[in-house]
Image (spheres, rainbow, N blue to C red):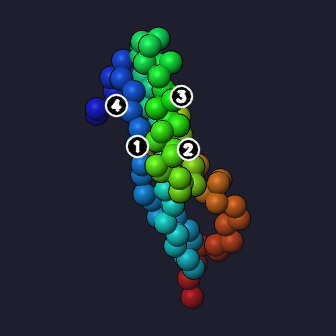
Amino acid sequence: MWLSADDERAFGFVRMTTGDEMSKRVKFVLVTWMGGNVSAMKRAKMSTDKAQVKSLIQNFAVEIQTSDLDELEYDYVLQELRKAGGANYGTGNRD
């Protein structure tokens, strides 16, 4: 995976479908990756670069900033979206 580089940083914008059996919603996630071995200069630039990215991409439900690949797993991101989305009224059954 390209994000396994500990000396890299990256931004991602992910589209996911959430909801229950009664309704589906499209949500977006802004991902900021900063590897554990990113140089001090790259770390310092991250906040200004992130501000520029956020000025272009303004519509997202969740922002994940991480250096842990486990936090980029589908189930983890979906769980974060559900937490940010508020109430889930689904029963698990659709009549």
Q: Position of residue 42 (x, y in %)?
A: 43, 18
What residue is shown with label 2?
63
- Farthest bottom residue in view: 95
- Compared to residue 57, the image places residue 25 above or below, namely below
User: Which mark is first along the chain, 1 or 2?
Assistant: 1
Instruction: Choose mark 4 or mark 3, whichever is in front.
Output: 3
73 or 85, which lies in front? 85
Element carrying mark 4: helix
Of residue 57 and residue 8, the one placed in the foreground of this image is 57
Mark 3 or mark 1, whichever is nearer to me: 3
Which residue in the protein does label 4 denote? Answer: 3
Using the rendered view, name the quadrant where residue 23 is placed.
bottom right
If the image is split into quadrants, where does the N terminus sit?
Answer: top left
Per the model, the C-alpha gap separating discs 4 and 2 is 17 Å
Q: Which residue is mark 3?
A: 47
Q: In the image, what residue occupies the spot 53% across and 53% down?
A: 58
Q: Secondary structure at mark 3?
A: helix
Q: Are marks 2 and 1 in contact (CB under 8 Å)?
A: no
CA separation, marks 4 and 1? 11 Å
Q: Residues within 10 Å of mark 2 (few under 14, many from 20)?
A: some
Residue at image position (49%, 56%) is 28
Residue 25 position (above or below residue 22): above
Q: Is residue 68 visible?
A: no
Q: Which mark is residue 76?
A: none
Which label is found at residue 12?
Answer: 1
Mark 4 neighbour density, 10 Å: few (under 14) some (14–19) many (20 or more): some
- Amino acid on which the number 3 mark rests in the picture: Ser
Counting residues from the N terminus, which is met first, the one under dot 4 or under dot 1?
4
